[in-house]
Image (cartoon, rainbow, N blue to C red):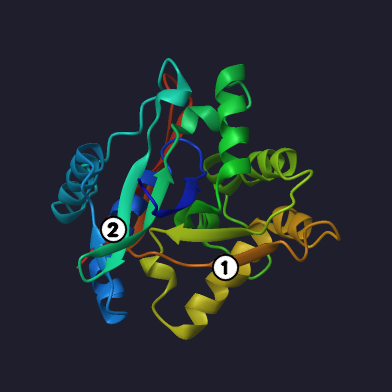
Amino acid sequence: MDELKELKIIMVAPRGIGKTSLLAAMHEEFDKTFEQANLTTWTTDSKTLQAIEDCKQILRQIDPRLKTKVTPTPSQDDPWNDEGFMFEIGSGSKKFMRLKFTDPSGEYFKLGARQDQKEYVKQQLNECDAVVIPIDATALMQKKNGKVNEHEIGDWHEEKNAPKRITSLLKDAYTSLTVPRLIILAPIKCETYMKTPKDANDLLNHVKLGYHQLLEFFKSDDLFNKMAVVVTPVQTIGNVTLGASQFCKNTGMRSLATQCQE
């Protein structure tokens, strides 16, 4: 009989933000982090292994102009066929916990998503113990003419990170929440904004500013004692700076052409 305690985690972000890349970066650090606590991790699920290794391979070999990109998670005919990514944790040879990451296609979070996709997202938000919200730091922190000031939000934040849409999804799912939830706001591609303690604090303040409505919702009387919110920047591909902004009419998506500096 399988007696492993299961911790369910869902990645919530629009298409093209980097949910799967973030998951790969987290997995890269699993062994180091858990080893310090005398814990062991296992990844025995073949689907998880293949997806993570493919993604990490791209991250390792990424070129300075970032021409190599991770393939977005495709939407499925039936969202409930998504089995997620499985990781197991234990001590020595004994396993005692399973982490299940659900990484839905970004298409599911769109306002115009199919009804079954919307229902799937709401069900996962209700069932998952933790929510990871990847944030494109470049979209949050940059304007067309340079870096934002302390009271500004990046020109592409609403378009790329869709904070209002994410707030709406969580409000709908957590209307009658009865159990605690962990929310992780995870700025990615944030190397430029983490060079000094002052830079890091500035990034934190802009996350608070860019997700003000969501954070205010979490502070409401019904949720205040049920929500734990942390901001965890994740550096994945080196020193990233904004190169250009391009809008693709075919996909309806904007691409922020970033580049890596030596």
Residue 125 % position (x, y): 60, 42
Would you place residue 194 above or below residue 250 in this image? below
Instruction: Quadrant for the N terminus, please.
Output: top left
The Cα atoms of the two marked residues, 2 and 1, are separated by: 19 Å
Residue 148 % position (x, y): 57, 63
Would you place residue 115 above or below residue 207 in this image? above
Q: Which residue is mark 2?
A: 27
Front residue (pair 214, 9): 9
Crowd class of label 1 (few under 14; some 14 to 19; many from 20; radius 10 Å): few
In the figure, is residue 172 to the left or right of 242? right
The residue furthest front is 1
| Residue 260 position by quadrant | bottom left
| Residue 41 position by quadrant | bottom left
**Sequence-first tag of 2 and 1:** 2
* Residue in the picture at 47% in, 46% down: 11
Front residue (pair 94, 181): 94
| Residue 50 position by quadrant | top left
In the figure, is residue 241 to the left or right of 172? left
Residue 145 % position (x, y): 51, 56
Instruction: Quadrant for the C terminus, please.
Output: bottom left
* Residue in the picture at 28% in, 73% down: 39
Q: Which residue is mark 1?
A: 230
* Residue in the picture at 39% in, 78% down: 195
Q: In the rendered structure, which amino acid carries the disc numbered 2?
A: His
Front residue (pair 190, 153): 190
Q: Of helix, strand and loop, which one carries label 2?
A: helix
Front residue (pair 98, 140): 98
Q: Of helix, strand and loop, which one carries label 1?
A: strand
Q: In the rendered structure, which amino acid carries the disc numbered 1?
A: Val
**Tag 2 and tag 1, C-beta contact below 8 Å:** no
